[in-house]
Image (cartoon, rainbow, N blue to C red):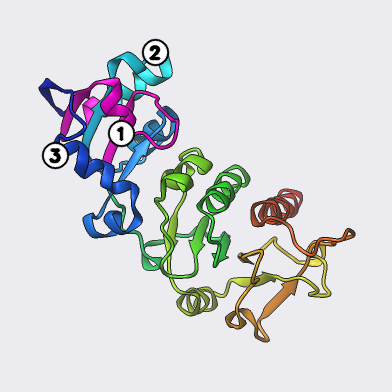
Amino acid sequence: MGRRETGLITSVQNPRIKAAARLRDSRARRKAGRFLIDGAREISRAIGAGVTVHEAFICPELCDSPERQEAARLAEESAAETFHVTPAVFAKLAFGDREEGTVLVAATPQRTLADLQLPANPLIAVLEGVEKPGNFGAVLRTADAAGVSAVIAADGSHDVYNPNVIRASLGAVFTLPVCAADSSTTLDRLRSQRIAIYAARVGAGRLYTDADFRGPAAIILGSEAHGLSEVWRGDDITSIELPMHGVVDSLNVSAAAAVLVYEALRQRTAAE
């Protein structure tokens, strides 16, 4: 059970509030090994996934729906320390205009490529150089819906627990196996496990519908601006493309990911 503070924090200058607010910055998150979670759904999914919660900041006035009240209850039960705050103090912690009554300070999960436990017939999404956290989060949301086994951020330094990732994924970042690794290490892992590798590229010459996603497979996607690096070329890597009939030459990475993973799901469902 969480330990609840009896006092009410009313000042934005409170040291705990200032320390928590600094976690909006990625460098501060890396240094502290902690990150912030807000949003009732995201909080519930994080706690359900076993994320370690150090502090919960709750504004009772903003917990004005059953969903928000349940998130606050779970936070109080899970956090090592719980503090009530005023609406003005809560605004200092909340991300953007999201004021749903509870913000958590949690320990950053230390998932590595070696930690991934894959099923016998995995479908993996690998994202290289996807800079916008919202796009990464949107891919996680789609991956969760389509039954993807794991998502790898293959640039080694991706901030997986950026607030925009958490929000755009609707908390799927906590329930999916997700990790960051560099591209070469990721490729070595895929090869060692004999997973078929499909790299999405403009002008690949092979339609995505011609790929065989029924067995163990990894779908590799790059950024819209730069595409994939040369790491993702090789005799054992199949380049695939989505047809582009207009004037633009690429799709948003989250849209491309949705098309590809659902094609994989269609093939796998038909095979069953």
Kindly identify the amino acid type of the residue bearing the numbered disc 3.
Answer: Pro
**Label 2 element class:** loop
| Residue bearing the label numbered 2 | 64
- Mark before the other along the chain sequence, 1 or 3: 3
The label shown at residue 15 is: 3
Count neighbours of disc 1 (C-alpha within 10 A) and say few if under 14, some if 14 to 19, many if 20 or more: some
Q: Is residue 2 left or right of residue 130?
A: left
Count neighbours of disc 2 (C-alpha within 10 A) and say few if under 14, some if 14 to 19, many if 20 or more: few
Q: Position of residue 222 (x, y in %)?
A: 62, 67
Say which of 140 and 28 sits in front.
28
Mark 3–mark 2 Cα distance, whole angstroms, equals 27 Å
Mark 2–mark 1 Cα distance, whole angstroms, equals 19 Å
| Residue 179: quadrant of the picture | bottom left
Q: From what the image shows, is residue 55 above or below residue 111? A: above
Magenta region: 76-105
Question: Decide: marks 2, 1 in contact (CB < 8 A)?
Answer: no
Q: Is residue 47 left or right of residue 175?
A: left
- Mark before the other along the chain sequence, 3 or 2: 3
Q: Is residue 41 left or right of residue 2?
A: right
Kindly identify the amino acid type of the residue bearing the numbered disc 1.
Answer: Lys
Q: Position of residue 184 (x, y in %)?
A: 49, 80
| Residue bearing the label numbered 1 | 92
Q: Which callout, 3 or 2, points to the residue nearer the camera?
A: 3
**Label 1 element class:** helix
The label shown at residue 14 is: none
Kindly identify the amino acid type of the residue bearing the numbered disc 2.
Answer: Asp
- For the point 66% across and 64% down, the residue is 224
Magenta stretch contains residue 195: no
Q: From what the image shows, is residue 202 above or below residue 81? A: below
Question: Decide: marks 1, 3 in contact (CB < 8 A)?
Answer: no
